[in-house]
Image (cartoon, rainbow, N blue to C red):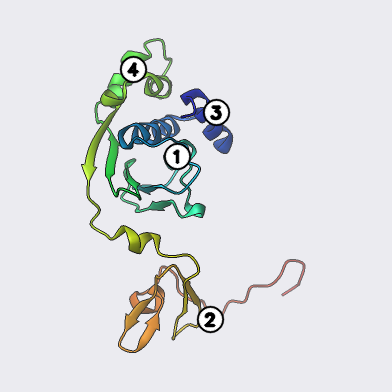
Amino acid sequence: MLPLIELLAQTARLHHHLCPRQVLGVRMGLYAGQLLELDLPQSDKQLFVIAETDGCGVDGISVATNCWIGRRTLRVEDYGKLAATFVDTQTEQAVRIVPRPSARERARQYAPAARSRWEAQLLGYQQLPDEELFSAQPVRLSIDLRAILSHAGLRAVCDLCGEEIMNEREIKQADLTLCRSCAQGSYYQIVADFAIVPLGVER
């Protein structure tokens, strides 16, 4: 495993600064590697992570584990929690790690010279022992890991909108193959009276 200081430097470069949540994310990833006995950051795709929020903590997890959304080794289920479940895809062992509620106060004890609560967390989170910083629980996924991972190269076309669907995310309704937007509703609505004009072209 790469040392903590090197991983923190990597995540700081991503954000142009280092914050307490990045430290927590890196430490969570390293702790998961210890608990699952995996050598991280990984060079393959054995570890899969489900993060329970987005933001800088997840970038810390990614740097420590080499699990990224773009590599399809990280998924965000946004519960608004800086927590994550780490899954060994070969053994299907999984562990959910979350910072302990007491971690903020404990951090100050490890950084008594800190000039602010934020700085105490930044420094203290780097020093707290794993067992004091995190709660870790073995878990079993309630969704099929194989369905999440899918298979490379699988594609379908939605019978309503005509758009391509990847990774077995299509939904079958009666005799139709549908994308999730057409089957269940979407996060967007088409604006019929608006046209996108290329830059440099007058309306």
Q: Position of residue 130 (x, y in %)?
A: 31, 25
SS type, badge 1: helix
Mark 1 = which residue? 65
Judged left or right of residue 43, residue 111 is left
Check contact, mark 1 vs mark 4: CB within 8 A: no
Residue tagged 2: 192
Residue drawn at x 33%, y 20% is 128
Look at 45% across and 33% down and name the residue there.
22
Q: How many angstroms separate mark 1 from mark 4 (CA)?
A: 27 Å
Q: Residue furthest front?
A: 90
Residue 140 x, y percent position in the rendering: 22, 50
Quarter location, residue 96: top left
- The residue at 45%/81% (across/down) is 158
Other residues around mark 2 within 10 Å, as few (<14) / some (14–19) / many (≥20): few
Mark positioned earlier in the residue sequence (4 or 3): 3
Which of pointers 1 and 2 lies earlier in the amino acid sequence? Answer: 1
- Amino acid, disc 4: Arg
Residue 108: image tag? 4
Front one among 8 and 88: 88
Nearest-to-viewer mark from 1 and 3: 1
72, 161: nearer the viewer = 72
Is 24 drawn above or below residue 43 in the view shown? above
Task: State which mark lies toward you, 1 or 4.
Answer: 1
Residue type, mark 2 in image: Ala
C-alpha gap between disc 4 and disc 3: 22 Å
Q: Along the line of sight, which residue is nearer the eye, 138 or 113? A: 138
Name which residue lies at 44% across and 85% down.
160
Name the disc covering residue 94, or none: none
Q: Determine whether the residue tagged by mark 2 lies in a helix, strand or loop.
A: loop
Gap in angstroms between the C-alphas marked 1 and 3: 15 Å
User: Do the residues under discs 2 and 4 have CB atoms within 8 angstroms?
Assistant: no
| Rendered location of residue 72, percent (x, y) | 46, 55
